[in-house]
């Protein structure tokens, strides 16, 4: 039996290696307890509402006969969507976090370090049925003990990992982080980004864009951070905001990071 890695290094296409701390069984169990409690409360509320509606719409004493069979079918279907839709909904809403994981400080990512997608979330959570056997996460815990990366069956099938969350960052903390330089690349010669006065930027501006691009998959607030950083760079170049409508913040940051190859 192998033991799970506490730390995992994952390389990116930019030839930068990111280190992740793999979440252990204890922290994942705490997150599961929180999520299971919330799911139980949701099921209690939805079942109560359905029963109330059935009693109000049907005869006294509740539905009977065919109506009772339909009620049970609807109840089972709604319970299924609550039980498994809970995880999928929150993992898409919070970039790989359920309320329990968010509270404990965990996040689901792909095995290559990129954010989890809807397909991976659906796969890993549908296979949760098998992980639960024979009792509460019985099979899942056994597989996690054997797995080198503490992955349950759902994680193995979806190629996902659960790691400790790095949380959100600010532009100030990003700017003080020393990171290796990206490989030089020529800036674009055509398109909406070609005419930007990149020569007005300082080396620190370019280094900040590089640092963000190298680590963006680690940030829970990467979209917001990219917009803030791009806005600051445009202001430093003296470019009005309405001139930035033809390209995305990420495109601008890539162009700025590549500019050091031409200076």
Image (cartoon, rainbow, N blue to C red):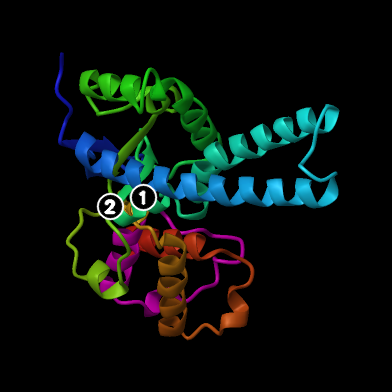
Is 20 in front, or is 86? 86
Q: Is residue 185 visible?
A: no
Q: Is residue 75 above or below residue 55?
A: above
Query: In the image, residue 68 lies at what x, y percent?
Result: 77, 32
Q: Tag 1, which secondary structure?
A: helix
Asked which quadrant contains residue 82, the reply is top right
The C terminus lies in quadrant:
bottom left
Which disc is residue 100 wearing?
A: 1
Query: In the image, residue 200 lies at what x, y percent?
Result: 38, 80
Magenta run includes residue 84: no
Query: In the image, residue 182 lies at what x, y percent?
Result: 29, 52
Work out which residue is located at the far front of the displayed protein and give it. 61
15 on left or right of 244: left
| Residue numbers of the magenta segment | 185-213
Distance from Cα at disc 1 to Cα at disc 2: 6 Å
73 on left or right of 27: right
Q: Is residue 86 above or below residue 127?
A: below
Residue count near mark 1 (Cα–Cα under 10 Å), binned few <14, some 14–19, many ≥20: many
The residue beneath circle 2 is 104
């Amino acid at each position: 039996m192998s033991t799970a890695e506490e730390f995992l290094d994952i390389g990116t296409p930019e030839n930068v290696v990111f280190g992740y701390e793999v979440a252990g069984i204890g922290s994942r169990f705490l997150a599961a307890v929180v999520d299971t409690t919330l799911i139980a409360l949701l099921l209690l509320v939805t079942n109560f509402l359905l029963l109330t509606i059935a009693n109000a719409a049907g005869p006294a004493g509740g539905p009977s006969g065919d109506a009772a069979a339909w009620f049970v079918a609807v109840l089972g279907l709604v319970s299924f969507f609550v039980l498994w839709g809970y995880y999928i909904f929150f993992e898409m809403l919070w970039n790989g976090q359920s309320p329990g994981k968010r509270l404990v400080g965990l996040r689901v990512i792909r095995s290559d370090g990129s954010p989890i997608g809807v397909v991976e979330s659906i796969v890993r959570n549908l296979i949760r049925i098998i992980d639960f056997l024979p009792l509460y996460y019985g099979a899942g815990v056994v597989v996690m003990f054997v797995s080198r990366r503490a992955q349950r069956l759902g994680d193995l099938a979806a190629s996902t990992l659960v790691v400790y969350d790095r949380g959100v960052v600010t532009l100030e903390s990003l700017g003080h982080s020393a990171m290796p330089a990206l490989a030089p690349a020529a800036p674009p010669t055509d398109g909406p980004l070609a005419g930007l006065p990149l020569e007005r930027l300082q080396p620190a501006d370019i280094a900040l864009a590089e640092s963000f691009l190298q680590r963006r998959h680690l940030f829970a607030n990467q979209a917001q951070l990219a917009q803030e950083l791009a806005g600051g760079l445009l202001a430093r170049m003296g470019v009005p905001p309405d001139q930035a409508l033809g390209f995305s913040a990420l495109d601008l940051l890539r162009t700025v990071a590549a500019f050091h190859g031409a200076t």
